[in-house]
Image: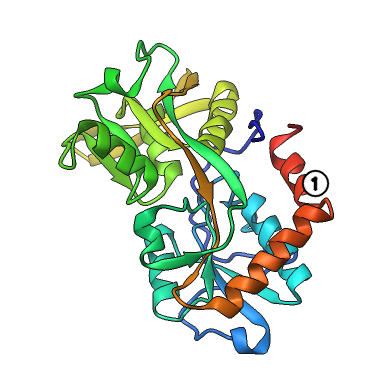
Amino acid sequence: MKKLLGLVIIFVVSTVLVLTSCNIKVDFGGEESSANEKRLLVATDAQFPPFESLGGDGMITGFDADILNAIAKEAGIEADLKHVGWEPMFKEVEQDKADAAIAAISITPERQSKYDFTNPYFISKQLLLLPVESNASSMEDLKGQKIGTLVNSTGSKTVKKEFGENYSKLKEFDDIPTAVKELAAGRLSAVVADSGVVKYYVKTLEKSEIKKEEKISSSNGEQTFIVKVGSTKIKALEDPFFTPESYGIVVKKGNAELLKKLNDGLQKIRANGTYDKIYKKYFGEE
């Protein structure tokens, strides 16, 4: 398994909704699938760097976008990638508004009971994102503290497995950037997320100046000020009890024809070296 290396990403939670990609056309959802015309609608959550992310210019880029583009090219298919968010992308597939979904989606037995997955295209592991001053050495040390995750993610399930299904200190977010922002502001003790994402943010926050909002009430009403609090340093921590996970592309249950096309495309990009080039672009050498 390839090991992830450090990367750099801008720590900005973008609200831009007009998405484009260098080779993948982007759509907004709500349209019926056009797979029969060899054009796929693929749903994603474009707030999951380095796999999917939004730049300040509204461009959507990332490892998954490049992998999807390469697979589609080898399979003789055109792919229209659309940003809909984490939970909505599964609904898009269920309701035939999208042919597939890609967003660093871990293959789990629960998800396999609802959807079909391609062969794995990436191996990951959950990591803890912590302030550098944290004394925690494992998930167990965080009992009773506020922990952030992506809603209904494997990170969320990891916390619930450790502390119980109704753990009151678990804070689930619609996107990882918001969770990391809360950690940087001191409102969380840790964030649990996939290793590639965690290592991205470690590099980011080691070099960035974090600003937070301060609200002051006066006779003129409540006003918000932005206060610079200096550089916030965070660290990644691996719990040895966290198990590796495999990512796959989701398709609707029973769509064997599309599944075969995607798997064939994936096999070809692994064989011809395209996969390795994309991997190196985002994660460096093995």
* Residue 221 sits in quarter: top left
- What percent of the width, then of the height, locates residue 241? 39, 26
Q: Is label 1 in a helix, a strand or a loop? A: helix
- In the image, is 1 to the left or to the right of 166? right
Q: How is the image coloured?
A: rainbow
Viewer can see residue 41 = yes
Identify the residue position indicated by label 1 in the image. Answer: 277
Within-10-Å neighbours for mark 1: few <14, some 14–19, many 20+: some
Viewer can see residue 62 = no
> Which residue in the rendered view is the most extreme toward the bottom?
37
- What percent of the width, then of the height, locates residue 135? 35, 10
Q: Quadrant of the N terminus?
A: top right
Nearer the observer, 11 or 91:
91
- In the image, is 169 to the left or to the right of 259? left
- What percent of the width, then of the height, locates residue 128? 42, 27
Nearer the observer, 146 or 72:
72
Residue visible at 36% across and 19% down?
A: 138
Residue visible at 68% across and 84% down?
A: 38
Eyeballing the image, is 229 above or below 49?
above
